[in-house]
Amino acid sequence: MSEQSQHRQWIYARHPEGLVVKDHYELRSQPLSLALSAGEVLVQAEYISVDPYMRINQSKKPAYNPEPHPLGVVQSAGVVGRVLVSASPDLPEGTWVEGMLGWQTHARAHASILRKLDLTDAPVSTALGVLGMPGRTAWFG
């Protein structure tokens, strides 16, 4: 991968009054930086969640979160991806991980906030479904 690769982010730009449409987001693109601090990894997103709680968090009405999703930042979301570059001995390049990395093609994150996925357990995409937050919500809810 070269420094010339692009990093794309979907920025939450405006609170919806009704249905969420593309105008509520702004797609930004910038050169991808490979620079990492100790313990960090660069993850390339392969699967990005779109979950019902996102719409609740976008509301200006009181909900289970005290504040709505802030404007001007990457839309929060669960992501399953592969480590492209690593400065962490716990997550070498090529490792599959899951974490709240948001709607973006790449994310720089500290290894401590990511969950390493075991490819022998199930398809990695299930980390955003039955073996992830929705599955835990269904089981415990």
Image (tube, rainbow, N blue to C red):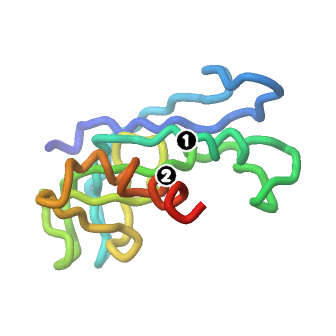
Q: Amino acid at mark 1?
A: Asp
The residue under label 1 is: 51
Cβ–Cβ under 8 Å for marks 2 and 1: yes
Which residue corresponds to the image point at 20% horizontal and 77% vertical from the top-left? 90
* Vertical position of residue 116 compared to residue 126: above or below: below
Q: Choose the circle earlier in sequence order: 2 or 1.
A: 1
Indicate left or right for 131 with 58 as reference.
Answer: left
Q: Give x and y (percent) for residue 40.
A: 31, 70
Which quadrant of the view contains residue 29?
top left
Q: Amino acid at mark 2?
A: Pro
Q: Quadrant of the C terminus?
A: bottom right
Query: Element at badge 2?
Result: helix
Disc on res. 134: 2
Which residue corresponds to the image point at 40% horizontal and 60% vertical from the top-left? 99
Q: Give x and y (percent) for residue 54.
A: 63, 43
* Vertical position of residue 98 compared to residue 10: above or below: below
Residue sitting nearer the eye, 117 or 10: 117
Badge 1 local density, few (<14 within 10 Å), some, or many (20+)?
some
